[in-house]
Amino acid sequence: MFFEPEKGDHGLPKNPFNSLIIPRPIGWISSLDKDGKVNLAPYSFFNAVSYRPPTLMFSVGAGAVSDDKIKDTRRNVEETGEFVHNIVTWDNREAMNATSESFPADVDELAAAGLTPLPSKLVKPPRVAQSPVQLECKYLSSYTVPHVAPENKYVVIFGEVVGIHIDDAFITGDGLIDVAKLKPLGRLGYQDYATVTGETQFTMERPDL
Amino acid sequence: MFFEPEKGDHGLPKNPFNSLIIPRPIGWISSLDKDGKVNLAPYSFFNAVSYRPPTLMFSVGAGAVSDDKIKDTRRNVEETGEFVHNIVTWDNREAMNATSESFPADVDELAAAGLTPLPSKLVKPPRVAQSPVQLECKYLSSYTVPHVAPENKYVVIFGEVVGIHIDDAFITGDGLIDVAKLKPLGRLGYQDYATVTGETQFTMERPDL
């Protein structure tokens, strides 16, 4: 089949677009508002964009709760300049999903999901104790995706990773990240997810390395 | 363990950063230079950033081949304004890996990897016949990642998806994308990958939907 998204003519019961760019890593972003209230929410339009310095991005759509349609995560990061990404794994999947609800700004999703905050070393927002990898980040800039109607506006947030916590239990004897043990989650389309397991992993050597 | 990337003090045999944001979807980007020569290369700093209109991004580091360190994909997209993303799956994994080699600009990686070009409908760069999903894209803009040394410069390319091809064999009777059959590949760290299989998929209903 072929369709043009602008014409909305896919003819399927659900828009297939978010099932076509998969599996997506999940940014689970903790932040603080200017009064110090905690926010935690997942974003699957998320990825690294640079190795040196390590830099990542996540895209935030319009919010459903506040009058200005700005999601708490975006407001907090732009106002305070800091956030933490906490890795989503098989073990914390239910808590991650609980934090996807559109709560009012004064709800601490981290506490509401039964998670434990840990102090960060270089930024103020807390880390999630139940995530075995946490990346402390400094906000760099926001980029408004062009050609998007104001009511659907997406803003891409860029941040530099200034501090990295890795639970030693997930580092192999060879000093590599033990992905099979970590079981990171990938986002698929609809309300689906996949987990990376040892059985689904394989290696392909780059031809020029 | 905790380390600060700026100090390079991770103490591991390999930088763990690209093993921490996983699994990453793989953008397999076909483009044409201004003389019509084909380029095809994979990028795992790749994701969607907006649903309406469907918009995607991929980040391109410095190239190893040309004197100006600009990779062919970036040069082509910025000069011609068009590209195609071809989905990477278990079945075309070896061909994808073959196209990751840093070839000189005049090499047609699509042909060199034994792949078959198909004409696109709305843009000039060809699609890869061996990819069951192809997204025809119009270039929107480039964003230079801040704080990066010139020799390591990363540029994030944004594109709007104007045409979507999906092989009907990968749509279920319910009109959903058949991910278990598609077996898309996710990029892990080092030289590792994972594939999404039916056994690793699961559903979690969003609490507020």
Image: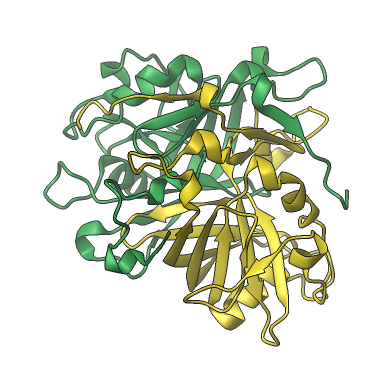
Chain colours: A yellow, B green
In this rendering, position of residue A130 left or right of residue B111? right
- The C terminus of chain A: image quadrant: top left
Residue A140 in sight here: no
Residue at 36% in and 39% down: A173
Kindly indicate the quadrant of the structure image that contains residue B108. top left
Label tally: 0
Q: Which x, y percent locates residue B202?
A: 74, 31
In this rendering, position of residue B171 left or right of residue B23? right
Residue at 34% in and 44% down: A175
- The N terminus of chain A: image quadrant: top right
Viewer-side residue, A205 vs A57: A205
Residue at 83% in and 75% down: A67
Kindly indicate the quadrant of the structure image that contains residue A28. bottom right
Residue at 71% in and 74% down: A38
Viewer-side residue, B204 vs A18: B204
Q: Which x, y percent locates residue B120?
A: 48, 26
Viewer-side residue, B76 vs B43: B43
| Vertical arrangement, residue B176 with respect to residue A43, above or below | above
In this rendering, position of residue A131 left or right of residue B115? right
Q: Which x, y percent locates residue B30?
A: 38, 32
Question: Seen from this angle, which residue lies furthest bottom?
Answer: A35
Residue A121 in sight here: yes
| Vertical arrangement, residue B81 with respect to residue B29, above or below | below
Viewer-side residue, B82 vs A13: A13
